[in-house]
Amino acid sequence: MTCPHVNDVTLLGKLAEDPVRRALPSGLVVAWRLIVDRPRKSPGRRVVDALACATYEPAVIDQTPTWRTGDLIEVHGSLRRRFWRPDELGIGRYEVEVYEATLVAVAPAPSRPQPTRSRHIPNQRRQAIARGASR
């Protein structure tokens, strides 16, 4: 009995940065990184993975212009190892080739810092203080 091989990846994580579009000879590709929390083994430091994702699928490409850093995205795809050869060294990396994606939650808008209260002294009082200091 032979078992079929399976290469199916599902990720749920936050966008590390806005997606990047590139035109390649083979067509348009959109790439991004997802920050995915690892399960905590004990209380303490948070550990995450930053996972490269890319898509050639028009339905997914059409969604990506609305995605922003921090958005929660769910992706389904396959793990791929890409190779290229600058000089004599073969370089490779893994990425998830996404065939389906869903925007699960929009990142909260960044909060603007509250203006600090300046100590405003009315002009007449400032002049009176200055006159008193010059005496």
Image (cartoon, grey):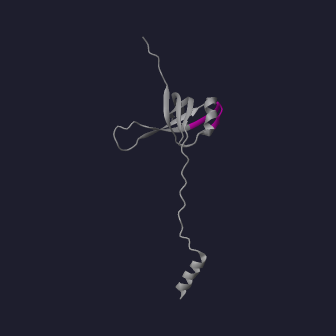
Q: In which quarter of the image is the N terminus?
A: top left
Identify the residue shown where x is 58% and y is 74%: 122
- Residue at position x 53%, y 70% from top? 119
Question: Is residue 22 shown to the viewer in this render?
Answer: yes
In terms of secondary structure, what is the magenta stretch mainly?
A: strand
Is 128 in front, or is 83?
128
120 vs 23: above or below: below
Q: Is 52 on the left-hand or right-hand side of 2?
A: right
User: Residue 54's image quarter?
Assistant: top right
Side of 42 where 74 appears, left or right:
right
Residue 112, image x, y percentages: 55, 54
Between residue 124 and residue 41, name the one nearer to us: 124
The residue drawn where x is 53% and y is 31% is: 75
Q: How many labels does the image show?
A: 0
Magenta segment? 21-31
In this rendering, the answer to whether 18 lies above or below 74 is below
Toward the top, the furthest residue is 1
Does the stretch in magenta take in 28? yes
Q: Can residue 86 be seen in this view?
A: no
Q: Residue furthest left?
A: 42
Taking the spot 44% from the left edge, 15% from the top edge, the residue there is: 3
Q: In which quarter of the view is residue 2 placed? A: top left
Residue 71: percent from the left, percent from the top?
Answer: 54, 40
Task: Quadrant for residue 121, please give it.
Answer: bottom right
On the image, the x and y values in percent for residue 74 come to 52, 33
Residue 13 is inside the magenta segment: no
Decide which of 23, 116 is in the foreground and name it: 116
The outermost residue toward the bottom is 135
> In the image, residue 6 lies at what x, y percent?
47, 21
